[in-house]
Image (cartoon, helix red, strand yellow):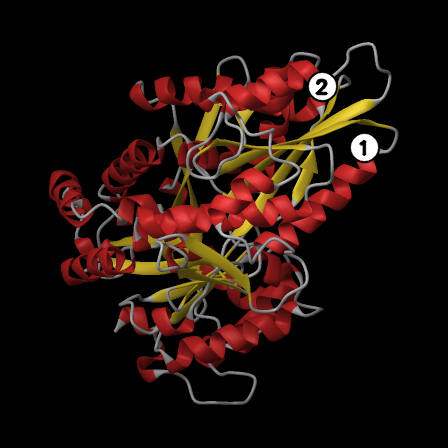
């Protein structure tokens, strides 16, 4: 761990409490700036230097590459593009002064890893670039260096008795195989780093032509998605969610679909993730919410009319006006609030705006809207925050259902136990076999969703026909092999819930 103290002269001093990796930690920042053998000389030209860290800036880096990368040398050089993980949260929460101190420590840790003859520069913000000179084994060196950097940056930083935890994502490219132009070489490493970020952070990845093609596709889809949203080119399909105590439909989940005129059918996981990263998720979410409510309002009304379940993003929940927006949509479409269920992924537990999100969810619940946590068990579940949020249900991710014969069963049993203690309904998605159906009912799951019970469809009319409705209940009973009044008994033989109904029906 690194401790930071201020000397009487007003300089920041860095000391390692554990020793080992950082041989320069006991130097003041002023001394470190000028004495490091890997600093770009003394950077006589201030235009080439970064004021905060004393490293080269973009201009200094490009000039260094021009002097040191030889196009006639058959050996490869490497560029590593580094981006700090979770730095923005620290900078926003603790202020720019603390953020600057973290950047100084991070750059010093990088220096401790960088080999002789290499170049370290600050590219901007929390991004850094390392250039390894042309050698015979530069790929092995780049891999070893990436490991060293990730491990070093991941160690806690102590600033004014506050322990800060950051991480590092690394992308690598190689000269001249990936690019001969220096800026294009850096861009290639940047693309690889961005892919690491998209896939969970805290790792390294080498650039490939596939990444370039993926980036081009994302760019094309990003432009097309904006037009598709504006022109209402997307459409919805509805998949039934079945009540395990009756076999009848509890809700329909509204699923966005996109048929591109030239690119064909776009995978929802692809364009929804793209909407998240291009800040179009709010426009997409509003479109889906209003259309789903409008459609649900046309379904035959009865005391047991099914709900419509709509996915919303954490970005929508962070909007303090979102609850009012939902209220306006409900009023406009004439859908009762009790027939709307909003599903949000576990990423809300990782978000750095817990107070706003809790207030938004509380406002929605006060309206009578139901709230479910989607893909539960796959990400950032925090039991301490789960018990404070006024939610109604959790949805077990399909990956656990698919692994019922393995460790998935233990995970599902744990989720059900927690949900019962918190008086939450449990919905299992991805039900595709009779065995899964019977097992999940026996475990006490409240509702079920999957292709076995009904695939997504643009048409819901057939589900409201008397014969079809009776078939669902009858076929469900035959498949499950259980009498309806036994469906809520758990594997331990506990008694059915009051009234034989899920908590959300009370």
| Residue where numbered disc 1 is placed | 138
Q: Where does the image place residue 181, in percent across and percent down from the top left? A: 65, 12
Bin the neighbour count of mark 1 within 10 Å (Cα to Cα): few under 14, some 14-19, many 20 and up. Answer: some
Looking at the rendered structure, the secondary structure element under dot 2 is helix
Name which residue lies at 69% across and 50% down.
Answer: 148
Name which residue lies at 70% across and 33% down.
Answer: 118
Q: Where does the image place residue 413, in percent across and percent down from the top left? A: 55, 76
Of the numbered discs in the image, which one, if any, rests on residue 496? none
Looking at the rendered structure, the secondary structure element under dot 1 is helix
Left or right of 173 in this view: 92: left
Q: Where does the image place residue 346, in percent across and percent down from the top left? A: 43, 57
The image shows a total of numbered marks equal to: 2
Bin the neighbour count of mark 2 within 10 Å (Cα to Cα): few under 14, some 14-19, many 20 and up. Answer: some
- Quadrant where the N terminus lies? bottom right
**Residue 257, relative to residue 153: is it above or below?**
above
Please say whether residue 312 is visible from this viewpoint: no
| 136 and 473: which is toward the camera | 136
| 490 and 321: which is toward the camera | 321
Q: CA distance from mark 1 to mark 2?
A: 15 Å
| 8 and 325: which is toward the camera | 8
The image quarter in which residue 389 lies: bottom left
Name which residue lies at 54% across and 35% down.
Answer: 128
Depth-wise, is mark 1 or mark 2 nearer the camera? 2
Left or right of 78 in this view: 104: left
Of the numbered discs in the image, which one, if any, rests on residue 68? 2
* Farthest-out residue, front: 9
**Residue 46, relative to residue 88: is it above or below?**
above
- Quadrant where the C terminus lies? bottom left
Q: Where does the image place residue 99, in percent across and percent down from the top left? A: 38, 48
Please say whether residue 158 is visible from this viewpoint: yes
């Amino acid at each position: 761990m690194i401790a930071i103290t201020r000397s009487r002269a007003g300089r920041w001093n860095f000391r390692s409490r554990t020793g080992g990796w950082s041989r320069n930690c006991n130097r003041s920042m002023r001394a470190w700036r000028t004495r490091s053998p890997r600093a770009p000389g003394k950077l006589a030209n201030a235009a080439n230097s970064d004021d905060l860290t004393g490293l080269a800036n973009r201009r200094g880096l490009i000039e260094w590459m021009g002097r040191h990368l030889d196009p006639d040398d058959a050996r490869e050089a490497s560029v590593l593009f580094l981006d700090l993980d979770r730095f923005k949260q620290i900078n926003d929460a603790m202020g720019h002064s603390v953020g600057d101190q973290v950047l100084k420590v991070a750059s010093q840790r990088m220096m401790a890893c960088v080999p002789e003859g290499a170049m370290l520069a600050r590219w901007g913000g929390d991004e850094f670039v390392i250039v390894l000179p042309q050698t015979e084994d530069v790929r092995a060196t780049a891999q070893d260096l990436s490991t060293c950097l990730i491990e070093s940056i991941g160690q806690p930083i102590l600033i004014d008795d506050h322990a800060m935890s950051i991480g590092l994502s690394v992308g690598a490219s190689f000269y001249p195989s990936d690019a001969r132009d220096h800026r294009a070489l850096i861009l290639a490493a940047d693309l690889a780093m961005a892919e690491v970020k998209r896939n969970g952070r805290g790792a390294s990845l080498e650039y490939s032509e596939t990444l370039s093609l993926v980036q081009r596709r994302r760019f094309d889809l990003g432009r097309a998605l904006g037009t598709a949203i504006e022109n209402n080119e997307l459409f919805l399909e509805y998949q039934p969610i079945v009540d395990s105590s009756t076999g009848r439909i509890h809700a329909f989940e509204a699923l966005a679909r996109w048929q591109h005129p030239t690119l064909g059918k776009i995978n929802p996981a692809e364009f929804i993730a793209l909407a998240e990263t291009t800040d179009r998720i709010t426009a997409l979410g509003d479109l889906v919410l209003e259309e789903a409510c409008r459609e649900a309002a046309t379904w035959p009304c009865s005391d047991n009319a099914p709900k419509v379940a709509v996915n919303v993003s954490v970005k929508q929940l962070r909007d303090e006006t979102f609850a009012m927006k939902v209220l306006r949509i409900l009023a406009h479409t004439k859908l009762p609030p009790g027939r709307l269920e909003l599903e949000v992924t576990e990423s809300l537990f990782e978000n750095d705006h817990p107070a706003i999100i809790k207030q938004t969810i509380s406002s929605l619940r006060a309206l009578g809207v139901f709230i479910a946590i989607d893909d539960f068990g796959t990400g950032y579940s925090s039991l301490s925050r789960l018990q404070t949020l006024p939610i109604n249900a959790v949805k077990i991710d399909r990956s656990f259902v698919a692994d019922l014969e393995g460790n998935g069963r233990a995970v599902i049993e744990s989720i059900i136990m927690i949900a019962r203690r918190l008086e939450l309904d449990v919905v299992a998605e991805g039900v595709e076999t009779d065995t899964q159906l019977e097992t999940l009912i026996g475990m006490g799951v409240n509702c079920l969703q999957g292709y076995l019970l009904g695939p997504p469809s643009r048409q819901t009319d057939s589900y409201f026909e008397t014969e079809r409705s009776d078939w669902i209940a009858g076929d469900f009973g035959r498949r499950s092999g259980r009498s309806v009044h036994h469906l809520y008994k758990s594997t331990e033989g506990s008694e059915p819930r009051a009234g034989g109904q899920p908590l959300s029906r009370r």
